[in-house]
Amino acid sequence: MISRNLEKAREAWLRRDPAASRTAHSAAAGAAAGERHAGAGKYIKSIVYGGMDGIVTTFAVVAGVNGASLSPAVVLILGFANLVADGLSMSIGDYLSSKSEQEYRRAERAREEWEVEHYPEGEKTELRELYEAKGIPGPDARQMVETVSRHPKAWVDIMMVEELGIVPGEGSPLKNALITFVSFAIFGLVPLLATILARSVPFLAVNAFPVSAALVAVTLFTLGAVKTKITGRPWLGSGLETLVVGGITAAAAWAVGKLLGGLA
């Protein structure tokens, strides 16, 4: 296990805190991080981006219908249709792309393993040239290659990254797809909540769209802030950026609905 807590290391870098960086790179921090993040951490991308797509596309539907001054029933019909259709489309695309990446990765690894076994000298030359291209002097590069070549699995791992640019991937394509769909559906439901509750809450009957817009704005900002777990950017800037992008999408949908509302 790598003796560092990546999350804490990123926080230390953002604060430019050398002491916190040393703590994050300790064996204890690495062990704690492994225990805490081994399960769900690798699926955060599917959660965040599935949720973002769900809330933005569903609110675009709500905004477009509102711009056309159509009935709340139309909001719910089109909104739920979007949740199911777009959610399935996105999750199936996630599954197929993840599965294709894994199949490509396995095929390339099998080829590298075969080449290491049947033509090791050629692979040594390739790796040495790669190291030298990075600025490592020839004698040092040769010594590094001789050391690596005594460990076939590590050798293939390094060739996959250095020669092919293929980084080992984690996660089940099926789990990724399911998490994407569930995240899309849950967050995509947020823009519809005000309309769903409007029948029993008189205030929402006349203010459904403003309330929906407020809920979406808060959720978009939160998702943008959470996204920094992937990007490492400051949470405030990421949250505002996501809010602005989502707002532009909604405004465009509302404007189209207003423009074409007379056709309904």
Image (cartoon, helix red, strand yellow):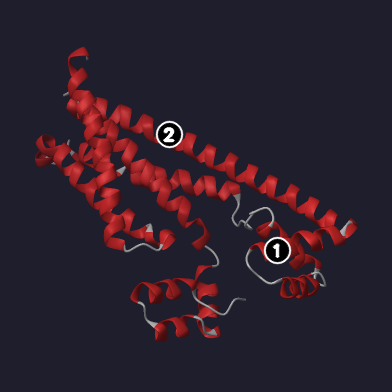
Viewer-closest of 162 and 76: 162
Q: Amino acid at mark 1?
A: Ile
Residue 90 visible within the image: yes
Q: Label for residue 86?
A: 2
Q: Secondary structure at mark 2?
A: helix
Q: Earlier in the sequence, mark 2 or mark 1?
A: 2
Q: Residues within 10 Å of mark 2 (few under 14, many from 20)?
A: some
At a point 17% along the width and 23% down the height, the residue shown is 258
At a point 30% along the width and 49% down the height, the residue shown is 242
234 to the left or right of 211: right
Viewer-closest of 140 and 259: 140
Residue 40 visible within the image: no
51 to the left or right of 199: right
Q: Residue furthest top?
A: 263
At a point 69% along the width and 65% down the height, the residue shown is 132
The image position of residue 198, as x and y in percent, is 17, 37
The image position of residue 215, as x and y in percent, is 22, 48
The image position of residue 148, as x and y in percent, is 77, 71
On-image quarter of the C terminus: top left
Q: Which residue is mark 1?
A: 158
Q: Amino acid at mark 2?
A: Asp
Q: Label for residue 20?
A: none
Q: Is residue 256 above or below residue 237?
A: above
At a point 80% along the width and 50% down the height, the residue shown is 111
Q: Is residue 232 above or below residue 55?
A: below
Q: Secondary structure at mark 1?
A: helix
Viewer-closest of 115 and 255: 115
Q: Are marks 2 and 1 in contact (CB under 8 Å)?
A: no
Which quadrant holds residue 158?
A: bottom right
Q: Work out how far the residue at label 2 is from the one at label 1, CA to CA, in angstroms.
A: 39 Å
